[in-house]
Image (cartoon, coloured by chain):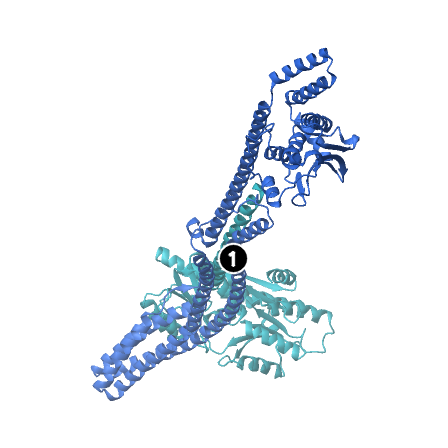
Chain colours: A cyan, B blue
Amino acid sequence: MKVRKDLYEKKIRRQYLVLILTLLFTLLTLIFGSLYFRFYRLELVKQAEAHTYDKYFVMITDNYKTDFWQSVYEGALEKARESDIYVDLLGMNLSRDYSCEELMKIATASKVDGIMVCADESSSMTALINDAVSNGIPVVTLYGDNTHSDRLSFVGIGGYSVGKMYAKQIINIIKDARREKLFGDEGIEENRKVQVAVLANADTKDAGQNIIISAIQDTISEENVTDAEFDVSIVTVDNTNAFSVEESIRDIFLNEDVPDVIVCLNELNTTCTYQAVVDFNKVGEVNVLGYYDSSEIVKAIDRGGVYATISIDTRQLGEYSVSALLDYYEFGNTSEYYLADVTLIDRSNVADFLKKEALDE
Amino acid sequence: MNKFLNSPLQTKIISACVLANITIFIVNLFLIVGINSMSKDMEMVYESNRSLNELSVALNMVQDSMTEYLSSKTSESLENYYINAQKFKDLTDDLGDKVTDFSFNRMERNIKYMSGEYLEQVEQTIEAKRGRNVEKYRAYYESSTDLFENIQSYITSLNLELFVINSEDFITLIQTFRTFEIIGVVVMTFVMIGNVIIITSFVKAMIMPLRSLADSANEIADGDFDVTLPSVSYSDEVGIVIGAFNKMIVSIKDYIEQLKVSMANERYMQEKELMMEAHLKDAQLRYLQAQINPHFLFNTLNAGAQLAMMEGADRTYEYVQTVADFFRYNVKNQKDAVTLREEVTLVDNYIHILNVRFSGDIGYEKQVDERLLDHKMPSMILQPIVENAVNHGIREMAGDGRIVLRVYRQDKDVCISVKDNGKGISNETIEKILSGDYVSDENAYDNNGIGMDNVIKRLRLFVGYEDVLRIFSEGEGKGCEVVIRLPLEGAKNVQSDDR
C-alpha cells in the first residue's frame, strides 16, 4: 500500500522532471540557435575587418601588368608590411590605363606617404617629382631615373655592368663565329662582319638604355677585337603605342640583312624578338640577348631560342625602394643609389633557374 | 513551484497554454529579429554604392557650378558653388582614410585626399577668377579639371570594385538567409516538440492524482475498504476532491465500525437478557420446587408406612409407601433434567394415590414405548399435566373418567401424550393457557402448586422453541389431549449441555 503511494510520487516527480528538462531543452535550443546564427553572421562580418596600416606608399610604373613589375611590387610590399606600411601599385584598380605622369598627379593629390616611380628624364616628370617633393612626399625613382629632380634616391640596376655582361656575350658569339670560320669551308663567303643590333626604345629619355649601349660598345672595343669583325647598330623600336613594338621588331626580320645578334633591353622586346626568331625560322642564326628572366624567356634559353638573358633581382629592387623611403622617414636622409643584383642566365645555368621557378610555383 | 502547484486547476491549465504560447511567441520574436536585422543588412548592401553615386553627383555639381561661374560669373552660380562645395566637403569628410589590405579602403582614402586637393584648387580658381587673373585661373581650372576627371575615374573604379564586393556580400547574405530559414524551421520544430512534451507532461501530472483517485474509487467499489487513500498532493480542485473522497472513505469506515460495535452490543444485550430470564425462571422453579419439598411430611409418611407394616396392614403400607415415593421424588429431583421413566413412574404413583383417595375412580391406561424411557426431560412436567387433567377434566365424572398416557416416537420427536375423556376445554382457554394469560386459581383445592404456565415455560426454555406443548380439545364434553414433543436429538444435547 505504501509502495503505491511512493510509485505515484515517483511518477509525478518524473513528470515534473520531464517538464523541466523540456523547458531547459527548448531554452537551450533557442539560445543555441540564436548563438549559432550570431556566430555565423559574425564570421561573415569579420571578413570586412582588416589590418590598418601606418603608412601608405605607392609604386608608379608604365605597365603594371608585366611579370617584372609585379615581382618588384611583391618585393616592395613584403618589405613594407614588415614596417606596417602598405604599398599600392597605383593604377591597378583603376578602370582605365593612366600614364606615369597622370599617376604621379593622382599620387600627389592623394597625399600618399611615399612614391616609387619608374621615371624617365623628361622635364614634365621632373616637374611632377618636384611638385610631389614640395608637397612633402618623398619620391624614389625606380629602375628609371630622373637625375635632375629632387628625388630622394634612385633604385635600379647598374646599366654599365649590364652593358658589360651583354658585351661579353657578344664577344663569345663573335669568338664562336671565328671558330666556325676556321673549321668551316673558307674563302667562298666573304669575310662577313658580325652584325649586332641593339633594340632601343624610341623615346631616348631613358638614360639607363644609353648607358647600357655605350657600355657594350666600350667593352667590345676594349677586348682585342678588330672593328672589322663586328658592327654595332642601334635599332629604334617604336614604343609610343601599345602594339607598335611587336611591329617594329618584325620589320627587322623583314629586312634582307638580319642581324646576327639582337640585344633586347626590356622584357617585351625580348619576348617579341624570340617569337619573331621562331616565326622566321632563324633559330641558331640570330642570337638573342634577352632581358629579364620571365618563365617564357628562361624556357626559350633552355630550347636555344635565346642565347642568354640577364636576371634582375626584382624583389630586391622593390625592397630597396621601400628601404630608401623608410630610411628617409627614420633618419631624414638616405643613400642616393641602390643597385639591385644582376645575374646572367645562359645554357650553362638555365637548369638551376628552371628548378628555382618550379620550386617557386 | 509549490505555490503554482497549489493553485486552482483552471490556473494550471491556462498557465500551461500560456507557457506554450509564450515559448512560441519568443521563438517568433527571435525569428523576426533575425529577419529584421538581415533585411536591414540587405538594405545596406549597396549602400556604399549609393553614397558613392551621391558623391559623384556632388562632385559633378561642384565642377558644373565652377564652370558656370567661370563662364558667366553670376552671383547665383557662385552661391551654387559654395553650397555644392560645402555639400561635397561634407560627403568627403565622411570617407574613411584608413590604409588596409582592401583596395577599396585605400581608394576611398585617395578619393578623400584628392577631393580635398580638388576643392582647394577649385577655391583658388574661383579666387583667381574673382581677381580677374586670367592666366592663373586658366591654369588652376585645367589642373582642377584634371583632378576632377581623376577623382571621377577613381569613383567609377571604386564603384565597380564595391559593386563586385557588395554583390558577393549580397550572395552571402542570401545564403545566410537560407541558413537562417533552415535554423528557424529546425528551432521551431524542436520548440514545437518541446511544447507538445511540456503540455503532455503537464496534463499527465494534473490527471495523475485524478487517475489514482479513480483507481482507489474502483477498488472501493469492489468492496475493498482497506485501499490506500490517494495522497492530497496539492490543494487544487483535484486535491480538494481527493481530500473529500478520503474524508468520505474514512467516515464510511468509521460508520461501519460503529455499526459493527452496536450490533455486537445489541447481541450481547440480548444474550444477557435471555440469561437473566433463564435465571429468573430457574429461581422461580427452585422456589416452586422449594414449596413442594415437604421433608417433614415425607419422613412422617415413612414412619406411618413402617407402622402399617408392623401392624400387618399391607395395603395401607403400600399406599403410604407410594405417597412417600411421590414426595421423595420431589425432594430428590432438585436437578432440572430427569429421565422420562422417572416422570412416568411419578405419574403412576400419583394416579395410584388418587385412586386410593377416590377409591378407584380414575381409569388409567399406559401405552409406553420402552425404548424412549431413557430420554431426558425437565422434571415435574407430566404430573402437573395429569393433575390438571384430573382436576379440570374428569373430577366430576365419578367412575367414568379415563386418562391415557402415551409415549411414542413420531418423526424425530419423542411424543408424550396425556389424554382424558373429561369435559374438555374451549379454544379460547387453550389460547390463553398457551400464551400464559390464563389466571388459574392459585389457592385452588388439592393443588400441588405447579401451574400449567410454569410447565409450559420450563418446557419451552428446555427445548428452545415455542411449539413444544400442544393442547387439543374437540369441544365441551369431548375430552382433552395434551401432547409434548421433545426432539430426539436436541434433548440429548440439552442433557449434555445441562450438566
Establish if B379 lies above or below B31: above
Left or right: residue B473 compared with residue A112: right
Q: Which of these two is toward me, B169 or A323?
A: B169
Q: Position of residue B498 (x, y in %)?
A: 66, 27
Where is residue B265 drawn, in percent x and y? 53, 37
- Left or right, B33 with respect to B320, comes to left
Say above or below: A306 vs B56. above
Kind of element beneath mark 1 = helix
Q: Which residue is mark 1?
A: B203
Quarter of the image for residue B135 reads: bottom left
Return the chain for callout 1. Answer: B
Is there any visible trace of residue B59 in the rendered image? yes
- Residue B288 in percent (x, y) is at 58, 26
B142 or A273: nearer the eye? Answer: B142
Say few, some or many: other residues with alpha carbon within 10 Å of mark 1 (under 14 / 14 to 19 / 20 or more): some
Q: Quarter of the image containing the C terminus of chain B?
A: top right
